[in-house]
Amino acid sequence: MYGVRLGISAFILVIIAVLVRGWFWSAAHQPASQSTASRAVLTLAIGGSIIGLGALWRRKTQ
Amino acid sequence: MTQSFLDTLNGPRHETALRVFMAIVLGHWAEHLLQATQIYVLGWPVPEARGVLGYFFPYLVTSEMLHYGYAVVMLIGLWLLRPGFTGREDRRWWTIALCIQFFHHIEHFLLQAQYLLGHNLFGRPVPTSIVQLWVPRVELHLFYNTIVFIPMVVAMYFHMFPPEEEVERPACTCAWHRPVSQAV
């Protein structure tokens, strides 16, 4: 159980790392309006990923 | 016949079907993660960053076929495999993923239709989806794929390891710790 949960969590952390990298890249390489929109959706995606991690680790399972 | 196919898919073959489905989903992620790496880490121009298959077969990306194909397969998979999620938590998370993927698929359908009809919406030089009017494509689809994948994988986890309070529900072969009477 912990192995599966750790594996899923590790993959989600990879996704979060890419999203964070994209967040900083957008700030540096896109025009202001595009950058704001990109960072907004990337922030939402990071938030969703963290919610997913929380759901995985919060509940006691069989 | 259709019913027996669905019964098999959501009964004795549910575990196999979910494994195949997950392999497809991870293949899709490989495309997006490599594309993001090409842009964010390697500094490639966005139009040149086409992921794994798009690098070797650019037509798959420029024709919108590759990602529309993934979107359709994911939508169909999420829909067909949903009856097998019989618990409260796994079904709820899976349904969230299905709803989000439905909208994601609409966006890809618009892109595919523009390519096939040879006419782009909104007077744009390239096929453009609705939300793409405000959000750049690469970041938008990273967002879509994340918010579909997260509930989907949480659903799969709760399907394999049901929450403690769901001991009464029938256990699928996917569940790692099934009651003995149902495991035989």
Image (cartoon, coloured by chain):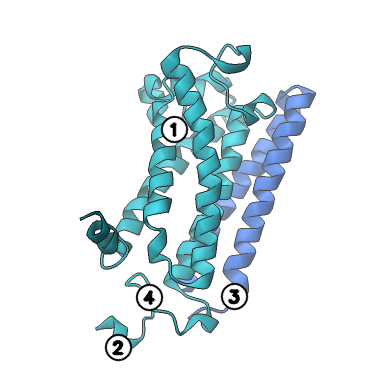
Residue count near mark 2 (Cα–Cα under 10 Å), binned few <14, some 14–19, many ≥20:
few
Seen at 38% across and 79% down, the residue is B170
Q: Colour of chain B?
A: cyan
Q: Amino acid at mark 1?
A: His
Residue B98 coordinates in the image, percent (x, y)? 50, 51
Residue labelled with disc 2: B181
Q: Which mark is residue B158?
A: none
Q: Tag 4: residue type? A: Trp
Residue B25 in percent (x, y) is at 42, 47
Q: Residues within 10 Å of mark 3 (few under 14, many from 20)?
A: few
Residue under pointer 4: B176
Identify the chain drawn in blue. A
Residues at marks 4 and 3 on the same chain = no
Q: With respect to residue A14, does B115 lie above or below?
A: above
Distance in Å between CA atoms under marks 4 and 1: 33 Å
Q: How busy is the neighbourhood of tag 4: few (under 14 within 10 Å), some, or many (20 plus)?
A: some
Contact, mark 2 vs mark 3 (Cβ under 8 Å): no
- The reply to whether callout 1 and callout 3 are in contact (CB within 8 Å) is no
